[in-house]
Amino acid sequence: MSDVTVVGSGASGVHFALSLLRKGYAVTMLDVGFAGPPAVNPDDTLNGLKENLADPVEYFLGRRFEALILPDAGKEYYGFPPSKNHVFRVPPPFTERSTGFEPLFSFARGGLAEAWTGGAYPFNDAELAAYPFGYEDLAPYYDLVAERIGILGADDDLARFYPRHRHLLPPLELDEHSTLLLANYHEKREHIQGALSCHVGRSRLAVLSRDLDRRRACDYSGRCLWGCPSGSLYTPSLTLEECLAFPGFTYVPNMLVTHFRYAAGRAIEAVCALDLERGTPCDFPVRRLVLAAGTLSTAKIFLQSIQQGSGRAPVLAGLMDNRQVLVPFITLALAGQPFDPETYQYHQLAMGIVGTDPREYVHGQITTLKTALMHPIIESMPLDLKTSLFLGRSLHAALGVANINFPDRRRPGNTVAIEPGADPAHACLRIRYAPPPGEGRILRALIRRVKRILWKLGAVVPPGMLHVRPMGASVHYAGTIPMARERAELGASEGCRSHDFPNLHFVDGTCFPFLPAKNLTLTLMANAARVADREF
Amino acid sequence: MSENADARLEREGRVFGRYLLGREAGAAVGARYAAAHGTLDWGEGRGWFERLLLAAAARHPLATRACDAYSRFLCPNSLLRRKLILLLAILELTPPFYREIDAAGPASAPKLAALIAWKGLTMAALLLPALVVLLPLQAASRVLAGRRPSGAGRV
C-alpha cells in the first residue's frame, strides 16, 4: 500500500504527486487516463501539415467531422480539434443531469488542462481575501510551479493585477496584430486607463520561450490549437511523465473511481473503482486519500461515498464557474493585409478591467485569429457564403476575439448532488446553477465598455456576433467543499483536509472559496504543491 | 451509398465549388465531399422544401447563391447551408485551395469597400427573386407539416 493515493492526473493531481515524490513518499495515482494520439509530423508547420498529410481533412476535422462547426453550434468560433477528442471523452457509466449549467468533464491523462490555452495568472491578496491564507503564503508555490512548467510574461501595466513571481521567462515575439493593438493601447493609454479603467499588457502564459529539460522553446509552428508538437505549451501530462520516472510512483490507468469506503471513525480504508477495461469493480486500500479528479468529479466521489456509507444524500452548495463572453472584433488597419500563420496562436495580450471592488476585477484575453478554421467565422456572417468568404479573406489578418471572464461567488442555490437510489457505478450527478441576480445588467454594461476599449485600440465589434457562453463552458469549476479557518461539515481546513474524513484531502478547485476572473489553473497547481508541502 | 447518389453528390460538389471559388474544385475535393455524406447523418428526414431548396441550388452557381442568401436569413440550419459549410471546411484544408482562402483580399480600403458594396448589392439582387419564389413555398411547407401527424416530415 502506498503512503498516499491520488485520484486524477489533472493539473493539481500531478503537481501534488510530484511534490510528494520529491519528499520521498510512495504515491499511487488512480486515473481513467484516456490518452491522445502522438503528434503527427512534429517538424511541420501548420501549412506544412496541410501540404504533407495524406488526409489533412481527417486530421483537422476528424474522422467523423466532429470539428466541423455547423450553424446550430451556438456561435462557437472554434471547436476542439480532433487531436484533443480524448480530453472530453466520458466513460459510459458516468452520467450527469444539469440545469442552467453545461458542464464539461475530462477523464484524460492530464485532465482538462490538456486543452489549456496556457493563461497562468497568480491570484492577488484581494482575490485571496476569502481564502484562509494570503498571497505571501502561496507565493513560494507560484515560484515553484513557474520553475517546473515555465511561465512567460512581462513587467507591464498588468503587473498591478498579477503579482510577479520568480522564474518568469521572457515573452514570445508578438504577432503583427497583437503588436498593433498594443501600440494603439500605448498611444491612448491615459484615456483607456482613466475613463475606461482598463489596462492592457502581455498575457502570462505557460509556454516556453527557451528550452526547459526535454521541452523545446516555442518554434512558432502555428500549431498551438491543434496540439503543440514541441511540448512548449505546457500540459499536465508532461508532469505526469516526470512522476513516472520516480520508483515510488505507481500509475493505475483505466480506473473510474466511484467512491471510497470508510470505517466507524470515518477513517477512509479503501477506494472503490470500476476497471473500465475489464468492467469489474476493484478496491484499493488507502492510508491517505487525495481527491484531485476535478471539482465535479471529486464532488461525485465524495457524495457517493457518503451515500454508500451512511445512506444520507447531502447536497454540496456553492458551485462556481467563470461566465465568459466572446467579443469578436476587426482591427480596421489590418483589413486586406496578409497574415503570418507561423506565430503563437493563443492569446498574447490580456486586459484587466477594474471596478470599485478589486474582487470584481474582470479579465480579458485577446486572441488574434490566424490559424483557427475560418468556416465557423465565415458561416456566422450575415451574408451569403460567397460574400462572407470574400469578406473573411479580406479581414482574416484583422480578426480577433476578446474572451471576457467574470468572477463568481459561492451562492447556496448552485448545487451538486447525487440522484438518490443510484448504484455507485451508475450514479447520476445532479447540477443546478443560476447566475447571480442582475447579471444581465452587469454584462451589458461591461460589454459596452469592452466595445469602447476595442474602439480605442483601433477595432470594431461587428453587430450580432457577440456570444455569451453558457455557464459551464469555461470549465473553471470550484467551490463545492470550501476551505475555511472555521470547522464546518462538508468543508475543509486551511490545508484542504476534509472536516468529515480525517485522512482525506482535496487539491483541485473543490476547496476554492472564491473564483476570481483570472484562469485558476496556475493557482490549482500552486495550491496542490502547498498542500503537499504543509500537510504531508 | 449508391452510384447514383455518389454521382449526384459529386455534381452537387462541383456546382457548389464553382459557387464558392469561382472555379471547379477538382475530382479529389468532389470525392471527399461525397464521401463525407457517408459519415454525416443529415438529411433523409428533412421536409420537401429543404430538398427543393437543395435541388434548385445544385443547378447552377447563380442559383446556389440565391438559395444560399435566402437560406442564411430564413432557413439558417438548412441542409443546403450545412453542405456548403462542409465543402468550405474541406476547401480550407486542402491544397491548393487553402492558399486561396488564406490569401488577403484587396489592400486598398476604397477598393475593398467598393467590392464589399458590389457583392452586397449582387446578393440583394439575387435575394429578392429568391424571396418571391421561396418564401411562399416555405410557408406552405410549414402549414402542411403542421397538418401532418406529429413527427411526420420534420424539417
Image (cartoon, rainbow, N blue to C red):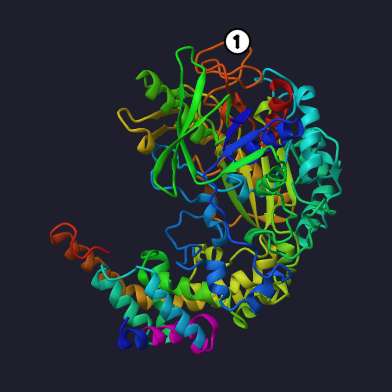
Task: Give, as a single range, the part of the protein colored magenta.
Answer: B9-27
Classify 10 Å Cα crowding around label 1: few (below 14), some (14-19), many (20 and above).
few
Q: Is residue A336 above or below residue A214?
A: below
Q: Residue furthest top?
A: A486
Residue A447, located in which quarter of the rendered image?
Answer: top right
Q: Nearer the viewer, residue A153 or A265?
A: A265
Residue A437 shows in this picture: no
Q: Which quadrant does the C terminus of chain B fall into? A: bottom left
| Chain letter, disc 1 residue | A
Tell me which residue sits at (84%, 54%) in the image: A211
Q: Residue at x 65, y 48 (%)?
A: A237
Is residue A366 something one can see in this rendering?
Answer: yes
Identified by mark 1, the residue type is: Glu
Residue A293: in magenta span: no
Position above or below: A12 against A398: above
In screen coordinates, is A229 left or right of A405? right
Place of residue A349 in the rendered image (x, y in percent of width and height, measured from the top left): 75, 49
Which residue is disc 1 drawn over? A486
Q: In the image, is residue A56 above or below residue A463? A: below
* Residue A275 occupies quadrant: top left
The N terminus of chain B, quarter of image: bottom left
